[in-house]
Amino acid sequence: MTIEAVTQELFEASQQRRVCKVKLVGEPSDRTIHPYGICQTSKNKITVVCLQVDGFTGATKLPSYKNLLLKDCESVEALDMRFLVQSNFNPEDPVYKDWVFHV
């Protein structure tokens, strides 16, 4: 998928509150995420801001908030499951510099 196609799929999924499977470059399996948005961080990286609920991860316990690099997303699949935005999600947090979109 192109970066534009990934962005469009994540945008539509976030607006419809649809859970997604995301495959990142170099990882052996998918991640299951709740896509909250795409932004430029305070460190000038373009990231997918999400709540990861299942799938590949390091030592982090799930569910956990993640900032996944958009350029590393190989594919995105919106699933038929829906999610609720967590009450502790704060799009005004200073780590998020400029939003492309968010829930």
Image (spheres, rainbow, N blue to C red):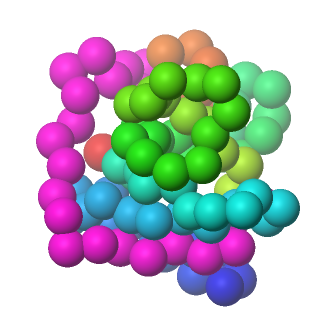
Q: Residue at x 52, y 41 (%)?
A: 49
Residue 39 x %, y %: 59, 43
Q: Residue at x 45, y 65 (%)?
A: 21
Answer whether residue 38 is visible to the viewer in this image: no
Horizontally, residue 47 falls left or right of residue 7, namely right
Q: Residue at x 20, y 73 (%)?
A: 80
Q: Nearer the viewer, residue 7 or 66?
A: 66
Asked if residue 84 lies in the magenta stretch, the reply is yes
Residue 23 x %, y %: 62, 66
Instruction: Quadrant for residue 53, please give it.
Output: top left
Horizontally, residue 100 falls left or right of residue 19, namely right
Answer whether residue 14 is visible to the viewer in this image: yes
Instruction: Quadrant for residue 63, please give it.
Output: top left
Residue 37 x %, y %: 45, 48
Asked if residue 64 lies in the magenta stretch, the reply is no
Q: Which residues are magenta?
A: 72-92
Residue 22 x %, y %: 54, 64
User: Split into 4 quadrants, where in the image is the N terminus?
Assistant: bottom right
Q: Nearer the viewer, residue 99 or 36?
A: 36
Q: Nearer the viewer, residue 60 or 77?
A: 60
User: Split into 4 quadrants, where in the image is the C terminus?
Assistant: top left
Q: Nearer the viewer, residue 61 or 72?
A: 61
Q: Is residue 24 above or below residue 103?
A: below
Q: Residue at x 60, y 49 (%)?
A: 56
